[in-house]
Amino acid sequence: MIIHRAYMDTLKREKASSLVLEASSLVLEPSSLMLEGSEMLEETKPSRQMDCEEISGEESSSSNDESQFPPASKVLLIVVAIYLAAFLVALDQTIIGVAIPKITDQFKSLSDIGWYGSAYFLTSTALQPSYGRIYKLFSVKWSFLAAVTIFEIGSLVCGVAPSSTVFIVGRAIAGVGVGGIFSGALVIISRTVPLAKRPLVFGIYGLVWGLASILGPLLGGAFTDRLSWRWCFYINLPVGGISIAVIIWILHIPHGTNASGIPWWRRIGELDLVGASLLIPAIICLILALQWGGNTYPWRNSRIIGLFVGFGVMAILFVTSQIYLESNSARSGTKDGRSGKATLPPWILMQRSMCSAAIFAFFFSGGFFLLVYYLPIFFQCAKGSSALTSGLQVLPFMLATVISSVSVGILVTAIGYYTPFLIASSALVAIGAGLITLYDVDISTGKWIGYQIVLGMGTGAGLQVPMTAVQTVLKPEDIPVGTAAITFFQTLGGAIFIAVGQSVFQNGLTAAIHDHAPGIDPSVIIRAGATDLRSTLATLGQLDMLQGVIESYVEGLRNTYRLSLALLMVAFVAACFLEWRSVKASGKSDDQDDSTVVSS
């Protein structure tokens, strides 16, 4: 702590020269409004002589000063527009689960399931930090519109895809747009909603997300059974069109003052293109290695080893570039020694809550999305359900998630403290994931419903509390960097562990077929897909092996659920290290010393 204070005292003597956009919260999507008067949100710059504690106290107070935010009528329109965009992406992320078996049947591509999720998360993860810089330097409105448009193009490509490869490309393009939608939402929320009320906004957002999550499997099942799985992606076009129209008509957020008067070519130079050019291929190498290892190629294959080496080298170079940018700014006398130019500044993870939230988001996201992708497959394979029926069968999970998300948002708004809710919810979601591993072919209806309810009741807090923590412990001008960092780790967790889950599932399925259905070629079952097992075995004249193949499928899925359990247990441990801070605090809290080091 003494070292930190000495370091901060040194930095405070440097010339201050920075002024940054406020931004804010996670997984929301803006499509918002800001007519006249959005410039009212300009921050008051603290004096160079003020102590770190004084600065932190003033800025925490200003975050709750409602006079600095638009009136309630405008905020209402803003958040409604944001919820519309949130609905769009939530629908896209949940509608695909029940359609995957039909997609793999048509393309004969069961081995590509992991890519349908990983390609999406890969691009949104790799570009997420860069979007934070884009929204800081360019028009929020037009940057966001560009992101929504890219997402729409990706959805269209998926809808018309003639092959699994083109479908994966479409998912990757959609992911590029999603990364920008997330970041734009954070900027808008922080500029329009006081800190003390943000947990409630997040809670209602959780309700919207949950409703989309409920409708996603139902619509996906209905489209897949009655029309075509392609309509799961065509539906994004009109919804996205409405969002774009509302944004063009209503939203007005000016450039940040630090971008005013800067030529566009200089702004491009501020985007840390070197960092982005290192981060993106590093993540691609990692995902490819995890996706191919043990499936397409043995783990000892030179391609897999080369990919891991490539990831390691580029990751080291990326970290080095980020450290250099920050240390160079300290030498040149920039405020707080931070250039604001790094894609993922190292100092951001030195703060206790930021570090805990990043680790939590990484593992929680991985565990959560594994269940979203692999629960419908259980019902369509083990229970012989249609796509629509399997959508209904995961409703207990989705409904419980909605209820818990709204409840936690209301409670945090009323009480102020968010950490106890995250710890309790993390324990509950781990218990729920453990119960899901007990799924088998003969499980009773009461059990599979009850297990999903336990799982969902623990999920709500994990989707929103990390962003509440970021906005509580960081200064307003550091919120864009903090939220981009947490979003990065969240999407990275989804990208990595969906790929790992695919490998775990496929390896488990192959091993189980040798035990439960000897004489069946595992590659034939993998190519057939979950919903074509019966017709495939009938064609082979081996329908008597159906029960053994179903048992093998369930065993492979159970291995994937166990992976989800392990990830959620790590997330629980990370949640326990979050600071106990209140969104209502107007000054220094008991733990302020830790956060002051990074917040000032």
Image (cartoon, rainbow, N blue to C red):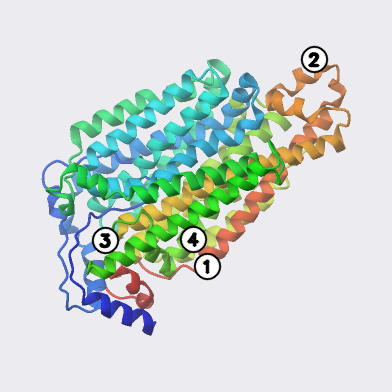
Label 3 vs 1, first from the N-terminus: 3
Looking at the rendered structure, the kind of residue marked 4 is: Leu
Distance from Cα at disc 3 to Cα at disc 1? 25 Å
Q: Is residue 207 left or right of residue 149?
A: right
Residue at horizontal 34%, vertical 36%? Answer: 85
* Mark drawn on residue 539: 2
Which residue in the protein does label 4 denote?
422
Distance from Cα at disc 3 to Cα at disc 2? 63 Å
Label 3 vs 2, first from the N-terminus: 3
Residue at horizontal 25%, vertical 44%? Answer: 268
- Does the residue at mark 2 contact the one at mark 4 (Cβ under 8 Å)? no
x and y, in percent, of residue 544 in the image: 87, 23
Looking at the rendered structure, the kind of residue marked 3 is: Pro
Looking at the rendered structure, the kind of residue marked 2 is: Thr
Q: Secondary structure at mark 2?
A: helix
Distance from Cα at disc 4 to Cα at disc 1? 8 Å
Distance from Cα at disc 2 to Cα at disc 1? 54 Å
Total count of labels: 4
Which residue in the protein does label 1 denote?
576
Closest to the observer: 133 or 599?
133
Label 4 vs 1, first from the N-terminus: 4
Residue neighbourhood size for the residue with mark 3, other residues' Cα within 10 Å, grouped as few (<14), some (14–19), many (≥20): many
Query: Considering the image in quadrants, where does the N terminus appear?
Result: bottom left
x and y, in percent, of residue 301 in the image: 69, 43
Mark 4 vs mark 1, foreground winner is 1
Mark 2 vs mark 1, foreground winner is 2
- Does the residue at mark 2 contact the one at mark 1 (Cβ under 8 Å)? no
